[in-house]
Each structure stands twice: as structure tokens, then as C-alpha cells.
Image (tube, rainbow, N blue to C red):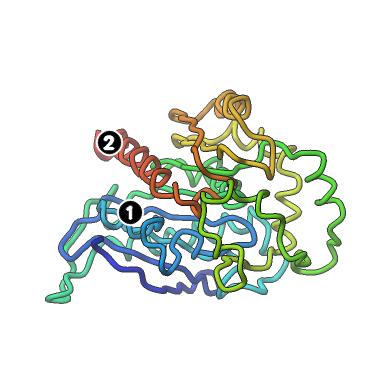
Amino acid sequence: MPGRVENVAYDIAGLTLSGLLARPGPGVRPRGLLLALHGGGSRAAYWHREGAAEGSLLLLGAALGWTVLAIDRPGYGASAGLARERQGLDAQADLVFALLDEVAESLVDTPDEATGIPAGAESDGPGRLPVFVVAHSMGAILALRMGADKRGRELLGLAVGGAPLRYTPQRLAEFASVPTEGDFVPSTGGGAPDTFFGPPGSYDPALLTRAGRVAAAVPMAEFLDVRETPHTLPAVLARVVPPVHWTVAEFERSQPAGPEVAAEARELLTAAGWVETHTQRGVGHNISLHHAARAYHLRVLAFAEECLLASPADG
């Protein structure tokens, strides 16, 4: 595929945010910026694993003309150990908006590798790429909060997967048993495979080994926000303005999911430009870590293209 994935880091509001970046091929004008937000206990590599190019959102997005930035959310990667008062999802939203203010302009141009001269780009204003957000699980809650913020009205759209409208009684009991004194959620070695993955054969079994696992410590303030999500998310959804693509996994077991959950999301997203819901076959909660990741990412990118066509800059 055109493009290559590089490690990047940005100094934002006194901390460093790390991540992975892929651009279209030399001379290709980026269609926009695809910002990817990973879930809890993960990192940017959720969207691009070495040796699994077929499931990479970054390579696929770059091949289809998008600049794709998967960040290690605040509290992960280079910013692990972030002060607790900056770990919560509202604080994370402030940092991600600040990041977008920085990179949506700096990433407008795609360098021509032969000459080193920027090739230019389409934009939604002087020197700024239009931004579409794709997000998973805890990252999806963050993306929805961004879409509900007045600063999020300029976003092209949101594609969210694994967003919890409610939890099972078992999950609530697990949350209640977590000690909350520290800065990170204590590690329990991870849940059973069928909690976050589909049936055997739907994913690479190496993901269950220490070498293959995409894992990181969960910041405590983020966890506390996520634990309260069933109480706080409905009001957030009512304020989301950008179009939303909402995906539930066929084999979702970490939370209640199914057609009734998708229908409830549609009912709550009353202010969104439009809403599409989809059940992704062949996956568990960690949608993008399954063999069907490419199918899911293609749907996300098709939705992003529709949002781009409908944006005022193009209309």
C-alpha cells in the first residue's frame, strides 16, 4: 500500500503526545485528517500492528488518500504518568483539541519524497485539514464528548465502536471491586479472551501472548469517568452535532450490545447531522484486532467520504 507508518510526538500544553502517522503517497493531496483514538488499556498500535498490515487503519487510510494520525491518548505512551487531574476524559478532550489545532495545519502538506517540496492539500479552510475521528471503547466515549463540545462542531464526523450505553451486572461488580487510590487501575492480567474477542479463528492468537498483546495501564481518572458512563453518556449524546457512525460487535461480551442498543443510540443522538448504526460480523469488542478489521475500516472510511461530500467546504 502507498504510505508508510512513522512514530511521531507532539509537545502539547506542557506534555508530549506520542503516536503513529501515515500519509498518502508522494504528491497525493490529503482528503483530510483521520484521527484515531484507542480504547482503555491499549495504545496507538491498536490501529496498526507490525506484521498485520491487512488490518491496519493507517495503511488503508493513507492508501485511500487520507492522512491518518493514531495518538497515544493523554495518559498513555509518552504521556504515561500524567497527573491525575489531567487524566479525566474532559481534560483529555481539551488536550486533543489542542493537538488538532497544532496538527490540522502542520499536516496539510504531503512532502514529495523525491524533492522534499510539499505537494499541497485540500482543506476546509486556509491551511487546515478537515478532521474525522474514529474511536474505540474508552476512546469512543472521548470522541463523543468531543462531538458534544462546541469545538467539535467543525469535525467532519465520528465513527465509534464499543461505546458502552450500559454495563452488565457482572461488569459493574468488577468495576466496584477496583481500588481507586492510585494513579492507574491495578492490572489483573486481562480478562478472558472471549470478553474482548470473537470466537477462535476470528483473530490472531498471538494477541493473547505477552509478545503480541497491545496493552497499557489504564489511568485511574479515566476509569472513574468510564465507570459512570451509563449515567453521563445519554446527556452527552443529545449534544453531539457531527454525523455519527455507531458500530456494535457481533460477539460483544464486555457490555450489552445488539440491535436494541444501536436503536437506543439512534434515539439519543438527536442533534447529530445523521446517524448510521452497524453490527460488524466476525468480531468481539476489540473490533480492529480481528481478521474482519479491514471490512470495518472500509465502512468507516466510506462514511468519512460521505461526511466529506456533505461538509460545507464541499457543498
237 to the left or right of 157: right
Q: Secondary structure at mark 2?
A: helix
| Badge 2 amino acid | Leu
- Give me the residue at 41% from left, 63% from top: 52
Q: Residue at x 76, y 64 (%)?
A: 185
Quarter of the picture containing the C terminus is: top left
Q: Nearer the viewer, mark 2 or mark 1?
A: 1
Residue extending farthest left: 115
Look at the picture and state if 263 lies above or below 304: above
How many angstroms separate mark 2 from mark 1 (CA)? 17 Å
Residue 236 x/y as whole percent? 62, 37
Label 1, on which residue?
Answer: 61
Residue 245 in the image: x percent, y percent?
Answer: 46, 36
Q: Quadrant of residue 168?
A: top right
Q: Answer with left or right where residue 162 lies relative to residue 297.
A: right
The residue indicated by pointer 2 is 309
- Which image quadrant: the N terminus? bottom left
Disc with the residue nearer the chain's start (2 vs 1)? 1
Q: Is residue 176 above or below residue 216?
A: above
- Classed neighbour count for the residue bearing mark 1: other residues with Cα under 10 Å, few (<14), some (14–19), many (≥20): many
Under mark 1, the amino acid is: Gly
